[in-house]
Amino acid sequence: MRSIIPRSSGRAVAALLAGVALTACDDALGVNGGGVVALTFRVATTSAAQLAAVSGADDGPAAVVGPPMLIAGSNGTLTISEIRLIVAEVELEGEDDDFCDDDGSDGDDSSGSGGSSGDDCADFEAPPRFLDLPLDGQPIEAFVGLIPPGVYDEIEFEIEDLEDDEDDTEFAAEIAALHASILDEFPDWPRKATALVVGTFESEADGVIDFRVYVEAEIEVERDLVPPLVVGDGDVAAELTVDIRPDIWFKRSDGSVLPLHVYDYDLTGSLLELEVEIEDGFTEIEIDD
């Protein structure tokens, strides 16, 4: 398993993938060309000993996976029982991106082969997915698909909301379908929400207080793959696993945690904006091939 160094910069996004259909830069590949790649997400773990050591310390809170997940800070402890996310578009970009336009299509190729020498871009096109993150550190698959052979050095994905403001009519229809499905389970889900966090906040002053918090964080996450992902023709499979750090989402620089009960949707009717925090919480990437 190879470790991937995350890139610190990136734009905010929200959305997750459900079914999987893949389009690559070279339509001539068919089902036999390229290799199979899967993207999974995993809540990063911290040991109970580490949590006890830093609880209340100046270097900030730590998290222990459960379920439930515990995030301890100097002002109290968040116990998180549920995290839901919406993820949408995923793209792998190659070292030679001269052949790949902004829309993911082929660029010109002087060889006349339709861009086969520069097919280092691939869009994983799938309906946006509503993801229930496992809080026990187990990975959950977001998509799997066939991509063309190439050397890929960057991955991008989006965290999406449910607003009906999409220019792409097909994607707009998929967002509408996902919205209807989510409302069956969460009738009060706001269109601008990209995530839901459920749990309790406990402190000596306030005791234990329940919360249901909707998060607004429509972002695009970009991360470098170091070393790059090399996909050969006919490769069986490669898996990219993105670690998620909820303690980064909900920590403060002074070592305290966000008192999420203050943002309880049932009480406030408001969303918690955490674009930068959510983006920074997608950390290490591993490639297993």
Image (tube, rainbow, N blue to C red):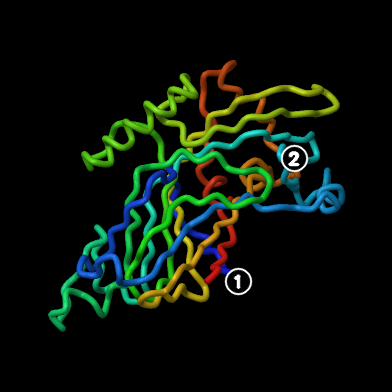
Query: Which residue is at the far bottom?
Result: 111
Please name the residue shown 55% across and 49% down the image.
Answer: 140
Query: Which residue is at the far top?
Result: 267
Q: Please say if 271 is above or below 93.
A: above
Q: Give the camera-side residue of 147 and 164.
A: 147
- The label on residue 263 is none
| Horizontal and vertical percent position of residue 123 | 32, 58
Tell which circle, 1 or 2, labels the residue nearer the N-terminal end.
1
Q: Amino acid at mark 1?
A: Met
Residue with the mark numbered 2: 70
Q: Please say if 171 is above or below 100.
A: above
Q: Is residue 245 left or right of residue 88?
A: right
Please name the residue shown 82% across and 53% down the image.
Answer: 50
Q: Secondary structure at mark 1?
A: loop
Mark 2 crowd level (few <14, some 14–19, many ≥20, 10 Å Cα): many
Please name the residue shown 63% across and 45% down the image.
Answer: 246
Q: Secondary structure at mark 2?
A: strand
Residue with the mark numbered 1: 1
| Horizontal and vertical percent position of residue 49 | 86, 52
Q: Amino acid at mark 2?
A: Leu
Q: Is residue 16 left or right of residue 74?
A: left
Q: CA distance from mark 1 to mark 2?
A: 28 Å
Mark 1 crowd level (few <14, some 14–19, many ≥20, 10 Å Cα): few
Q: Give the camera-side residue of 96 and 128.
A: 128
Q: Nearer the viewer, mark 1 or mark 2?
A: 1
Please name the residue shown 21% across and 75% down the image.
Answer: 115
| Horizontal and vertical percent position of residue 29 | 25, 70
Do callouts 1 and 2 mark residues in contact (Cβ within 8 Å)?
no
